[in-house]
Amino acid sequence: MGVTNIETDRLLIIPITYSMANSILHSDYKAFDNMGVHLSGKWPKQDTLDILHFIKDTLSKDDEVDGFGVWMIVKKEDMTAIGDAGFKGGPDENGAIEIGFGLVEEEQRKGYGYEAASSLLEWGSQIAGVKVIKADCLIDNAGSIHLLKKCGMRETGRDLELIYWEKNVSLH
């Protein structure tokens, strides 16, 4: 499936390909310069690097992406990468996908997280076979709790560390 960038008012959300992941993991940012994307040194964060190490070999070496991986969040104003968001794989046997997101600290509380997450939730809800989108966040992460509620997700449970969220997708 050919997946294209998502463009919002202030953001460009770009699916990370095998080549991009490899470049990031080897600190070779020439490909990003060629794309016109500036990496400020604040992104990628360590948790992004950990995810990319884990998923790199699951990405297609021909750089085709299905959209169910990691997406880079770029601020259009200055074409700086400010975070990432995405899904933890394609739909499971129940049609569920799980979303996650993170921004560099300096760009938090400016609406970028909501803009990116709501766009990806919309993208995911348009994919055949997706019935529910899930998320989780730390129990004390007020920013993520607010964002997930604002995106229309509802709390489905919690444990000592995490709150679990879901959003049902209309049937296709």
Image (tube, rainbow, N blue to C red):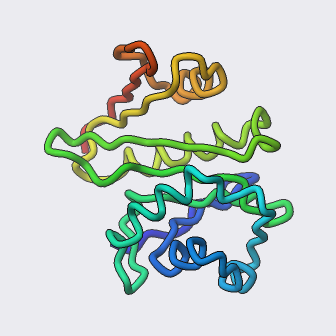
Query: Is 38 or 26 nearer to us in this picture?
Result: 26
Where 167 falls versus 37 (above or below)? above
Residue 111 location (% of width, % of height): 73, 37
Name the quadrant of the N terminus.
bottom left
Residue 135 location (% of width, % of height): 42, 33
Residue in the image at 66% along x and 25% along y: 143
Residue 124 shown left or right of residue 44 in the figure: left
Residue in the image at 44% along x and 19% along y: 163
Query: Is 61 or 118 nearer to us in this picture?
Result: 61
Residue in the image at 64% along x and 19% along y: 142
Residue in the image at 53% along x and 27% along y: 148
Where 44 falls versus 162 (above or below)? below
Where 105 falls versus 167 (above or below)? below
**Quarter residue 153 falls in:** top left
Query: Is 109 or 140 nearer to us in this picture?
Result: 140
Residue 127 location (% of width, % of height): 32, 53
Query: Is 51 or 153 nearer to us in this picture?
Result: 51
Residue 25 shown left or right of residue 166 in the figure: right
Residue 65 shown left or right of residue 92 in the figure: right
